[in-house]
Image (cartoon, coloured by chain):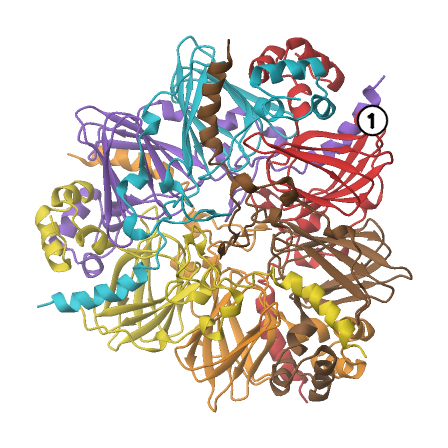
Chain colours: A red, B orange, C brown, D purple, E cyan, F yellow
Amino acid sequence: MIFPILFTFFLLLSSSNAAVQDFCVADFAAPEGPAGFSCKKPASVKVNDFVFSGLGIAGNTSNIIKAAVTPAFAAQFPGVNGLGISIARLDLAVGGVVPFHTHPGASEVLIVAEGTICAGFVASDNTPYLQTLEKGDIMVFPQGLLHFQVNGGEAPALAFASFGSASPGLQILDFALFKNDLATELIAQTTFLDAAQIKKLKGVLGGTN
Amino acid sequence: MIFPILFTFFLLLSSSNAAVQDFCVADFAAPEGPAGFSCKKPASVKVNDFVFSGLGIAGNTSNIIKAAVTPAFAAQFPGVNGLGISIARLDLAVGGVVPFHTHPGASEVLIVAEGTICAGFVASDNTPYLQTLEKGDIMVFPQGLLHFQVNGGEAPALAFASFGSASPGLQILDFALFKNDLATELIAQTTFLDAAQIKKLKGVLGGTN
Amino acid sequence: MIFPILFTFFLLLSSSNAAVQDFCVADFAAPEGPAGFSCKKPASVKVNDFVFSGLGIAGNTSNIIKAAVTPAFAAQFPGVNGLGISIARLDLAVGGVVPFHTHPGASEVLIVAEGTICAGFVASDNTPYLQTLEKGDIMVFPQGLLHFQVNGGEAPALAFASFGSASPGLQILDFALFKNDLATELIAQTTFLDAAQIKKLKGVLGGTN
Amino acid sequence: MIFPILFTFFLLLSSSNAAVQDFCVADFAAPEGPAGFSCKKPASVKVNDFVFSGLGIAGNTSNIIKAAVTPAFAAQFPGVNGLGISIARLDLAVGGVVPFHTHPGASEVLIVAEGTICAGFVASDNTPYLQTLEKGDIMVFPQGLLHFQVNGGEAPALAFASFGSASPGLQILDFALFKNDLATELIAQTTFLDAAQIKKLKGVLGGTN
Amino acid sequence: MIFPILFTFFLLLSSSNAAVQDFCVADFAAPEGPAGFSCKKPASVKVNDFVFSGLGIAGNTSNIIKAAVTPAFAAQFPGVNGLGISIARLDLAVGGVVPFHTHPGASEVLIVAEGTICAGFVASDNTPYLQTLEKGDIMVFPQGLLHFQVNGGEAPALAFASFGSASPGLQILDFALFKNDLATELIAQTTFLDAAQIKKLKGVLGGTN
Amino acid sequence: MIFPILFTFFLLLSSSNAAVQDFCVADFAAPEGPAGFSCKKPASVKVNDFVFSGLGIAGNTSNIIKAAVTPAFAAQFPGVNGLGISIARLDLAVGGVVPFHTHPGASEVLIVAEGTICAGFVASDNTPYLQTLEKGDIMVFPQGLLHFQVNGGEAPALAFASFGSASPGLQILDFALFKNDLATELIAQTTFLDAAQIKKLKGVLGGTN
């Protein structure tokens, strides 16, 4: 008759289990902190918190860059909160481009699932590192450095980007410069670009001033 | 008459002291985040938050494994929250065993306080590292690796396990496999164990399916 | 005539660039430390250090588990060293299984590129989280927890596993228990498995004692 | 007519932007955690959260140490919360002294803006490292080690101290020993100081017992 | 006669002191790793390793941007290696500009020591945060985000920038795009800039292709 | 005939195993870095690297403080290198004292194995937290804060101190102030202690100047 004894053992250990922070599924209704979102109560965690189906659907590339980025960061995929990892889907139509951008909070590994992608990053010493990637190739983009991806082939391309943070961030150079109300003169002064060039891109991207 | 002047100095510095995060005693009523529990308001912190007496009492080893683990993790001992350290008491009756388990969140150092303990871990290359530990000996178990402790002597053994996290976690292999509703067939497929063996252990540990 | 002036500016900043640690491509010939491999000298870094083509080739699944894991961790892909990220390719033939295992050093996000995969992990409180994943679905496995993947369909499956560490580690449960010289009696004592079961699996996997 | 298309692209990416944790401006009304204060809602963040003017005003050095420390830690300067950096202003009148102290949570770099400062720290092997710093000189004080600053010149001195934490902490040796109710006998026992010396300093600093 | 006894005590503790890693002064001749440079042997560490006088000298602003940045990162100031902090001097002549740039590895706090500086950064949601800073004002620039500094007054300006890393990195936007051999067509494709604009800036900054 | 197939599987996985950084046993002959000592080559790692017997032997308390600290930090116990944990033995004869000290690099949990210990720490706001600890009691001392232990009973006391770092450091207040060549006048200026008191303690502890 071992069950009562086992139960004792279980109770002892379960008190420690209560302390275990195996994961911290994001509770978007509670305060966020520097390390990420607050955790859902264990009782309300479900398997769906750890699974995300949004990356199975191609993004809409009918836009000016002929590209779409579909993120599964902590804000979309609560199960990765606090776990130091996230992922995004990248669709590039023929001629598609993900223009120069950075991820302030994480390094990225890109894996090409379909098609051909020409990718590159620029190091702090201004050296460019460029490569044409075929299906199955991977490339790493170190944290915070400017990089881009271009569909280098004649068919649509699909890739997945992994990040070493649940919230890697994404700063798109053109949007940062031209899609807000930064004064044209100030942009000219801090980028050396001509005012006419700046105004042209503001026009395309919706910036003012 | 220096007191007024001192007071000024005190006020200046006390404003910085308010910012000091010397510690973050767990407030179990506030949200938890990836870095641990929220902090109690400084005014309600007491010395008892930093002291824990539960490890002075032997755990009940009248159970199937003849062993008991008494944790002082952040969930039991709020003073360690956020400080990257915790401890547990391990009682092993004669013949007692802490079966194969892992701590997903921290490395462990075990110190033998009484008796003799045979302990071991298995590295990722499948090499086992085994040692018989006498009173005063210590052994380190690297984070996340399978390890066990067995009373190797003819008297009860007592040990303390230190962890490099306030919430190191504890996953007991047999419980993970046999103490839940994982289908016997699925366990067989993913462990190569025979169905009969699985069902036998489910029976002992309370698993179903 | 601005070039001499520009040159001065360049020199000033290039001294700071020398200090920039954008990346730390692994130098396998130099000492390794707790944070990873030593860095190659900047002058010998090439774009190929940041690109890896090995994941474009299907792993050989003609084995007992009908599965193959092809890693691109820091030891294979020197560009990810120190960047907190890595990736692996997972091929599962029909009936293929990646048996229960853990990654002691990182959480994992799995993305299904082809086929159907039934995946699951067990939390510290012994709750199993199981899901059948279709193409494009992703699932996260928190650091250090036991998990598995099984080809749940009638065609080969392909997936990529991302990790939040350049060296996440891999401990396969069956290998840790049965593919070394751990004494059968000791395994029985620390897993509650029957000796006959242990010996059978030692026979299959090449263990002794 | 590209605006509708652009809008689609914008919506796609803006969902990822919502997940970006560029910064975490401190919300002093929400719970604090081990990693810092909770974050203000993005909509209520303003440029003033990232700017602090309090260091432009000289601290009042009309006190016993002829010195003043004005902190811009996370508690005063909410924009640095979670960003691993903070700063303080240090005013030293002629003869001014910042007595031996430690910062438990961060290393410090001091830069002399005006005057001459004699600074020093003591390493764990008891070796003192002392230097007289002129305007523009910098000195680093490693985390947690006892250090001091003395105005070494004949004019007021001004310096800025940078810290590698948003909440570096500040423990002033004399205050820790003599500005509370620690029993004189206990201090004597744990510092080897004479009781008369202890009582004298308690008198000056306002300690009791 | 207590000296022999004391000596015993000293020896006991000094063995622990040997293990203390108070600091890790950079040894530029030994391998570098992901966490920084190797440490100099304790016996060769001197106070000068912790002191740097280079920031006392104004940088040469006789250049196209009328500005100079003088870093005291680990590569210049070996004492900060491994301590998570560094500093730089910023000189801005009248009309001087530090153009848009990022620090991939750390957040920055800028303190204005002389003059008036107009500074700003752009967040991931493209919101600009701009402020005119007077003497004594500080502003924080979160890690990895594009930011700039402009002399906003009619006299030279001096500032010090603190970083939460010993090697924060520095990527200057214009240099990354125009001061290397990236093909004009590729830059046009990934920035939307006109080819003529790109060629003009390549001409100024010394880029080719 | 499954062995050849298994062998293939083993080879595939073993390549990943080579990348696994389960542990990093200290190689004292190779360079040290900010994250700890370099790692021994895997082939030369032995179980003895993970076991340490030095804490089984009582330290010699025949000294002025009637106490002895025996560390098992990374410098003595190479197996903990890089694992974020270490331990020390503390022997206190009747009347023994571990005087005020700090650990700059880690928090500490003390567990009393024999006897009675009066322990305490002082927070940054100068509040003392004191407790008399009986056998089995534990107390946590947050990182970098001044703390002490005194044998509060009439029998020898034994305790073990765990640290959340493999190299927590140890700065003993009296040694830092009085056991070196810091000038008496400078100590007086930066501690407010009387010169006579300083000279007396320099005499006891071996300081000069």
Amino acid tagged 1: Asn
Residue designated by label 1: A63
The location of residue E28, given as percent across then percent down, is: 40, 43
Report if residue D188 is visible in the image: yes
* Quarter of the figure with residue E189: top right
Does B162 sit left or right of A40 as displayed?
A: left
Q: Position of residue A41 (x, y in %)?
A: 66, 55
Sort mark 1 into few (<14), some (14-19) or many (20+) by Cα contacts within 10 Å: some
Residue shown at the point (81%, 48%) measured from the top left: A53
Instruction: Name the chain letter of the residue that bears numbered label 1.
Output: A
Q: Is residue C105 left or right of residue A197?
A: left
| Rendered location of residue B189, percent (x, y) | 80, 72
Viewer-proximal residue, F139 or E2? Answer: E2
Looking at the image, residue E94 lies above or below residue C191: above
Residue extending furthest toward the right: C154
- Residue B200 coordinates in the image, percent (x, y): 75, 84
Residue farthest toward the bottom in the current orientation of the protein: B154
Asked whether residue A49 is in view, the answer is no
Residue nearer the viewer, D101 or B78? D101
Locate the N terminus of chain F by quadrant: bottom right
Looking at the picture, tell me which residue is in the foreground, E108 or E33: E33
**Residue E38 horizontal side relative to residue D130, left or right:** right
Is residue F144 left or right of B161 when viewed as pictured?
left
Q: Residue at x 40, y 81 (%)?
A: B135
What SS does tag 1 mark?
loop
